[in-house]
Amino acid sequence: MDKKIKSALISVFHKDGLDNIAKKLHALGITIYSTGGTQKFIESLDIPVQRVEDLTGYPSILDGRVKTLHPKVFGGILARREDDHLTQLETYDIPELDLVIVDLYPFEETVKNTNEEAKIIEKIDIGGISLIRAAAKNFNDVVVIPSKDNYEAFLQLLEEKNGLTSKADRKKFARDAFRVSSHYDTKIFEYYLEKDDENQGFKQSFLSGQTLRYGENPHQQGIYYGELDSMFEKLGGKELSFNNLVDVDAAVNLMREFEHDAPTFAVLKHTNACGVATRATVSEAWHAALAGDPVSAFGGILISNTKIDLETAEAIHSLFYEVLIAPDFDDDAKDLLQSKKKRILMKIKHFGSQAKSYKSLLNGVIEQDTDLSIEQEGDMRSVTNRQPTEEELNDLTFANKLVKHLKSNTIVLAKNNQLLGMGCGQTSRVDACKQAIEKAKHFGFSLEGAAMASDAFFPFPDCVEIAHKAGIKCVVQPGGSIKDQLSIDYCNENALAMVFTGIRHFKH
């Protein structure tokens, strides 16, 4: 229902535009309460003002840090206009406050203009933010104007309705009030993170909260905290789900390894790569990646390090997938791919990574350095009699990039810059090896002359033996087992090449 504004509390930093509001409130017979500089400004307009300190019986104290924090102020804002609350207001001689106009101290601007901590801290508004939240909470009875950005819209409302507001009006301003409050608190939080180098990794994770449809499963609530827009331009499709975001993160981390390589395409399912290939063109890379596991590609996440052209888009178009990520899309390719409205297209702006990664567990959080190690050919130390050929070194490097992004225990089989088969998430490395071989053969690949990568060392020669019998000719692993020599001996006896990187890539 419409309610008449009879009284207003005004406490603002920016006075521009306030004069017309104050004049209109006065013309409508609305009692104005104010304090400090705002009070003096309104009085300079020859408009009577009730001083907050006369209402509370306390002056502004502590260099202005405490002016409005008093039950006679917040009681008048938070009281429901119902018999019980109104009786209490009368008992304690508290006036109803129907309108609260606040413009917060310019914290964000101060941070931009000075590094002097004392000045910055003094611009953290306490009373103002409390007034905004109190008035927004009681939107059933109170109008809140939380920023100078709302002055014009509110003045128009006053002109149109002569001091009356509907519940919809009040709720709209309340919603904006919590947006202002959230943004303000976030900027303060960011400032403190900037001052604390140890917490830098948290910065991107807690900038904003977006409620998701649900978490991993429909019975779980999900919220995303971060700034997705800083990494992506979303070109269309439905809203990203919890699982989409987890998969997109895995896809971006993987493709970062190939960011500056020739056209590379990857297909992921449940955060694991099931198809990856590097080729002369993006279309060829797509077809080679899809060949790695065309069954798992259904409903997967697709990512390219290269612009998607029409030829590639036409090849992809018939497949059902959740998300397609690329640095850019030709206009005709984008038009075709967007013709399916639920399909999510994301233009990635950069493949940058955070220096720290986090995981919640045991009623807490653990932190670690992000695994940014990328071993190149020069980092691989040959430990066998037979040295790998240049072609084999290329395959070993390709396979080693992939093994880093699959769940442990992991084995990757690759040849000619193409993922042929992988085993991941196994409790036994032997099982991972067998799984990789079985997948490769299932999809028609010959493993003759292929390369094998392992995320951790081989404690026994069994995996090397199984791989050799399947046709594998070269192996990359971190080394470090007290029984490394057993695998090296097997390779020497069977003319296999093996290299050590010295870097383990567990991914749990």
Image: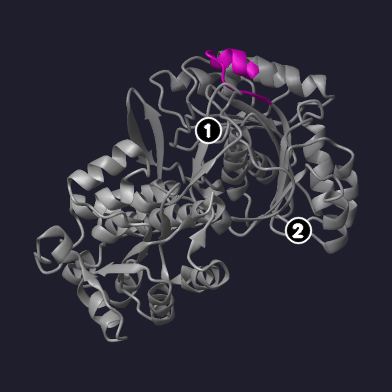
Query: Quick check: 336 left or right of 52?
Result: right
**Is 11 or 269 nearer to us in this picture?**
11
Residue designated by label 1? 222
**Is 81 or 145 nearer to us in this picture?**
81
Instruction: Check the image and report above or below for 12 versus 463.
Output: below
Q: Identity of the amino acid at label 2?
A: Lys
Mark 2 or mark 1, whichever is nearer to me: 1
Q: Secondary structure at mark 2?
A: loop
Instruction: Check the image and report above or below for 101 versus 291.
Output: below
**Residue 245: where, in percent of width, then height?**
59, 39
Query: Quick check: 399 left or right of 483?
Result: right
Distance in Å between CA atoms under marks 2 and 1: 32 Å
Q: Which residues are magenta?
A: 422-433
Q: Is residue 333 visible?
A: yes
Q: Secondary structure at mark 1?
A: loop
**Residue 126: where, in percent of width, then height?**
24, 58
**Residue 230: where, in percent of width, then height?**
54, 58
The residue under the point 46% across, 21% down is 485
**Is 313 or 338 nearer to us in this picture?**
338
Magenta region includes residue 426: yes
Mark 2 burial class by Cα count in 10 Å: few <14, some 14-19, many 20+: some
**Which mark, by number, is residue 307?**
2
**Residue 345: where, in percent of width, then height?**
73, 49
